[in-house]
Amino acid sequence: MTVTATSVDEPDQLEPRTAPGRRAWVRRLVPAAAAALSGLLLYVSFPPRALWWLALPAFAVLGWALHGRSWKTGLGLGYLFGLGFLLPLLVWTGVEVGPGPWLALVAIEALFVALAGAGIAAVSRLPGRPVWAAAVWIACEAARARVPFEGFPWGKVAFGQADGVFLPLAAVGGTPVLGFAVVLCGFGLYEVVRLAVPWRRTGTLRRAAAAVGLLSLAVPVVGAVAARPLVSGQAEDGSVTVAVIQGNVPRAGLDFNSQRRAVLDYHARETERLAARVGAGEVARPDFVLWPENSSDIDPFANPDARAVIDAAVKAIGAPVSVGGVVERDGRLYNEQILWDPAKGPVDTYDKRQIQPFGEYLPLRSLIGAINGDWTAMVRQDFSRGTEPGVFTMDGAEVGLVTCYEAAFDWAVRSEVADGAQMISVPSNNATFDRSEMTYQQLAMSRVRAVEHSRTVTVPVTSGVSAIIMPDGRITQKTGMFVADSLVQKVPLRSSETPATRLGVLPEIALVLVAAGGLGWAVGAGMRGRRAGDV
């Protein structure tokens, strides 16, 4: 009987011990799942989907997951958010090289999001927490855009807002102000929802917090509406007729470069086809023509045959052409744009300044070679960097060149406008990434840049999507992918500078200082609390 009684009573004795453990496990799992899923929600808000507004609930859920947490917990939850966001966003980086580089890139970049999570958790107990939290996020984006290997800004919140109501704010303070507004609105949304349910605080504190939440929602929207007059597609310096050439490539993937002569012939042929259409009166005669990056990977300065092909195409269209070439000077390789005049031949050049690590040069070459020799074989010789902005004078128009990867960097685009560019061209080569979302993500960047600096932006791409973008961010023409095509349009030239152009990096510095102030306040408050507890 004693044994039977013990066996009956045992479950009642064990239940109180296991239930708290189960609840603790659930308390850890739910915020972790919420952080990862909200990161995935932020990814879904990015192109090619026009679901920009999903960024708000994404940051609202992240705000809930981080609210009141320790910075260590915030670090882990932030990393999960980063993985949920960046794993699908950057999957294109592994399209041709396998999952290794993709996973390594995401693992490193998610560390910056982890730091943001730690910082947001730290400031989550402060009054006005949406402001501090949004500033912390932008500060971590600023760091991610600079280190390591000169940074990787891909996935800035601002780049997902090309279709959104906040876009005019890009003209106010560039991508930092646009991103700050979106993140602030998301955290403000969480505050409003949180305070809509019964709360134990005093009425005064609750009303103050509710006011901050509502202002965090309202101010970015009002600011975006107020910034609308900065967004204009009107010509200030006349108009020009521009042609964008997409010659296509023989095949997608890393080995498209093995068909260098075919790629050059395709772009020459499409230009000559356009010349025939102009001669037949089907399209307007362009004032100048823009070829994409890598449209001539055969150095026309060293190869007479390539030079002859380009020269014939330029003479056929009878207008200056910007040709994307790979050239070698003094033993160094350059990713170069070449201004080719129909009468004089090559007259000016621009060397790409922000070259792509692991694509155009290989950091830590000996270490990476020891890990995987195939990776070093893909980048046999490092490209060298240009040092000067590239603004071509093409039939009287000042055209700023921003080559492909450079469009992700604030300074690279701004420098061309500050140097007098009346419009911008972003020659690109996306054939390496097949039909992935990469080309649409990059196209959205160019739309944001158009509004940021109030300039027409053209995007000539070897394999698509090529496009013409108005200064207000609208795409007026675009091509398909992996087709030969050309776009011809009359576009406005502008010379006035937006506040974003004039202010440059100052808005970002200001937001970093706000983040530092919030973190300093949080650390100080924590130290005072610990001292009071010791007493």
Image (cartoon, rainbow, N blue to C red):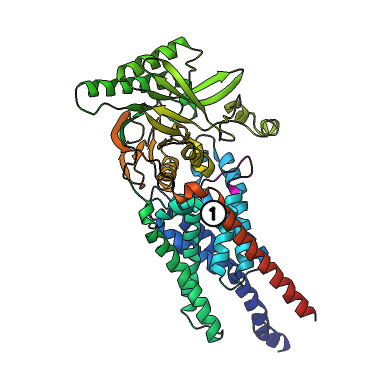
- Magenta stretch? 144-154
Predominant SS of the magenta segment: loop
In-front residue for pair 386/89: 386
User: Which three-letter amino acid code belongs to the residue tagged 1?
Assistant: Pro
* 236 with respect to 528 (left or right): left
The image position of residue 237, as x and y in percent, is 34, 38
The answer to whether residue 298 is above or below residue 100 is above
Task: Indicate whether residue 394 is drawn in magenta.
Answer: no
Quarter holding the C terminus is bottom right
In-front residue for pair 349/465: 349
The image position of residue 489, as x and y in percent, is 28, 34
The residue tagged 1 is 507
Q: Residue at 67% of width from left, 34% of height from top? A: 368
Give neighbour class at mark 1: few <14, some 14-19, many 20+ (Cα, 10 Å). some
Residue 291 can be seen in this image: no
Q: Residue at 58% of width from left, 70% of height from top? A: 67
The answer to whether residue 35 is above or below residue 213 is above
